[in-house]
Image (cartoon, grey):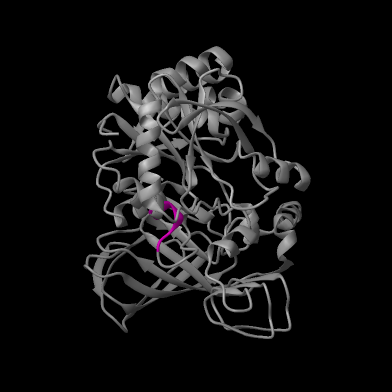
């Protein structure tokens, strides 16, 4: 157990959209970047767990292009100084993502081991997690190790791993079978046997061994990923894969592609309060409950409610006489559903997609590399936004063909470019940007700049932007 973790490279898979946690989680602001509990996101909590592992290498995050600046900013806020962010041009499930991570790791060190972690899981006991990682590291010389969660109840929402009794290493067992989500009676038999663990989706293995297995079992994935990585380019702080070649990789999970086919699969049991936060029911389970088995977040008042999860983001939510329901409030949507049908939220998301509703993708608060903006009010010919610009950041030099803008600074200091002018605005000062005028907003200060923007014109869409210069390469 004293073996150094110096060759261990943590890999965070952050490509999901978390549609089963709609309306809080959406395509452009998914659950892994949202502070679902407290003031830190699931991604930041994952970074913290990694930071507690002594001597590991720099973190590698695999995410899609739309989330790149959120991942970079949240890593910065978590004081992660050295990290690589690899951008998937299209989603291709976990097998291609891990293949890319393995290729990248081997480009940095010959004996690289990967610790593969989803960005959106909760783990309560970090000491037990660290111990399990060390056990998996010892077993990873000749095995592809997964972490199997010791079941705490009969559960039909997870896949299961059946393991043999023989240890391939200390507290690591050979895997005999991967099982899809069972029905209740089957899951009950699994728990009684003592030979089954929940499939956590976390792994540890040598990068070279994994590539050897993926090349054998799924050569199309290996070849497409190898070409996409070799043709990839550096873009600011990101690594962009070649889209044409990466798109040729079959979209398959790592379980199907490798773990179910290899004879080298091993599992380390994990007891650490694991929760994959895959639904509102799962999130409810992760909260502390009151004497009536309710859990809540935000400004909530309830009377005679039992077994409920109530999440308020923007305003007071009051509930009376509700039982076993989830109520989720955001600025532009409210969800009400029985907790035992929490998985069916995905059906609502599909209906919203079919109706081309923007609520399926976009939050009222939208994050950008320079900060964020939030729509306060919108009508046919005007829109009001609250804009926050992070310290020392600036928007692109741009113009609009169909709208004018009024800016009123409410906090901090703004440096404004308007046509040939450049000037500062302090709190309670304002300016006007006519249609077609080149302009730029910048925060030269050390505190966030906040302003109210009033747009007016015939078209107010975000695509009415002509950029002339942009530090973020958009």
Q: Which x, y percent locates residue 190?
A: 68, 40
Looking at the image, which is closer to me, 332 or 419? 332
The C terminus lies in which quarter of the figure?
A: top left
In the rendered image, the residue lying farthest to the top is: 216
The N terminus lies in which quarter of the figure?
A: top left
Looking at the image, which is closer to me, 8 or 351? 8
Q: Which x, y percent locates residue 79?
A: 26, 53
On the question of residue 433 being in view, the answer is yes
Looking at the image, which is closer to me, 403 or 319? 319
Q: Residue at x 25, y 42 (%)?
A: 54
Looking at the image, which is closer to me, 123 or 366? 123
The magenta segment = 40-44
Report whether 289 appears left or right of 85. right
Report whether 226 appears left or right of 383. left
Q: Is residue 74 above or below residue 206?
A: below
On the question of residue 250 being in view, the answer is no
- Magenta-drawn stretch, dominant element (helix, strand or loop): helix
Magenta residue check for 14: no
Q: Picture quarter containing residue 393? A: bottom left
Q: Which x, y percent locates residue 69?
A: 39, 50
Q: Residue at x 21, y 67 (%)?
A: 446
Q: Residue at x 31, y 82 (%)?
A: 429
Question: What number of labels is visible?
Answer: 0
Q: Which x, y percent locates residue 314?
A: 54, 77
């Amino acid at each position: 157990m004293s073996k150094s973790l110096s060759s261990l490279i943590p890999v965070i898979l952050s490509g999901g959209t978390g549609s089963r946690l709609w309306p809080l989680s959406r395509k452009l602001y998914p659950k892994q970047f949202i502070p679902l509990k407290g003031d830190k996101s699931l991604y930041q909590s994952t970074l913290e767990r990694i930071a507690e592992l002594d001597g590991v290498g720099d973190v590698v995050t695999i995410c899609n292009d739309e989330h790149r600046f959120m991942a970079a900013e949240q890593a910065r806020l978590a004081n992660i100084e050295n990290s690589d962010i690899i951008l998937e041009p299209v989603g291709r499930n976990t097998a291609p993502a891990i293949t890319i991570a393995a290729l990248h790791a081997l480009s940095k060190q010959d004996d690289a081991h990967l610790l593969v972690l989803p960005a959106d899981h909760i783990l309560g006991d970090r000491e037990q997690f660290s111990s399990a990682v060390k056990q998996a590291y010892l077993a990873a010389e000749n095995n592809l190790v997964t972490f199997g969660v010791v079941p705490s109840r009969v559960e039909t929402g997870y896949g299961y791993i059946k393991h043999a009794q023989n240890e391939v290493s200390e507290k690591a067992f050979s895997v005999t079978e991967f099982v899809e989500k069972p029905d209740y009676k089957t899951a009950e038999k699994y728990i009684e046997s003592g030979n089954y663990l929940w499939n956590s989706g976390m792994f540890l293995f040598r990068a070279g061994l994994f590539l050897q297995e993926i090349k054998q079992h799924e050569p199309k994935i290996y070849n497409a990923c190898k070409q996409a990585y070799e043709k990839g380019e550096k873009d600011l702080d990101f690594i962009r894969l070649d889209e044409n070649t990466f798109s040729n990789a079959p979209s398959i999970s790592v379980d199907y592609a490798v773990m179910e086919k290899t004879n080298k699969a091993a599992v380390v049991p994990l007891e650490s309060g694991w929760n994959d936060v895959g639904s509102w029911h799962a999130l409810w389970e992760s909260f502390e409950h009151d004497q009536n088995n309710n859990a809540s977040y935000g400004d909530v008042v309830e009377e005679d409610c039992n077994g409920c999860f109530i999440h308020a983001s923007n305003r007071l939510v009051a509930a009376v006489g509700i039982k076993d329901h989830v109520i989720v409030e955001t600025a532009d949507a409210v969800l009400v559903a029985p907790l035992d049908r929490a998985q069916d939220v995905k059906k609502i998301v599909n209906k919203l997609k079919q109706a081309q509703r923007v609520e399926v993708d976009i939050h009222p608060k939208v994050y950008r590399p320079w900060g964020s903006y939030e729509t306060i009010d919108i009508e046919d010919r005007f829109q009001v936004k609250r804009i926050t610009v992070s310290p020392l950041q600036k928007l692109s030099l741009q113009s609009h063909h169909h709208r004018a803008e009024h800016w009123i600074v409410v906090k901090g200091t703004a440096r404004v470019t308007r046509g040939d002018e450049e000037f500062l605005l302090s709190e309670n000062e304002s300016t006007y940007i006519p249609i077609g005028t080149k302009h730029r907003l910048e925060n030269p200060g050390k505190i966030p700049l906040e302003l109210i923007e009033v747009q007016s014109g015939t078209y107010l869409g975000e695509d009415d932007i002509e950029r002339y210069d942009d530090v973020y390469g958009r």
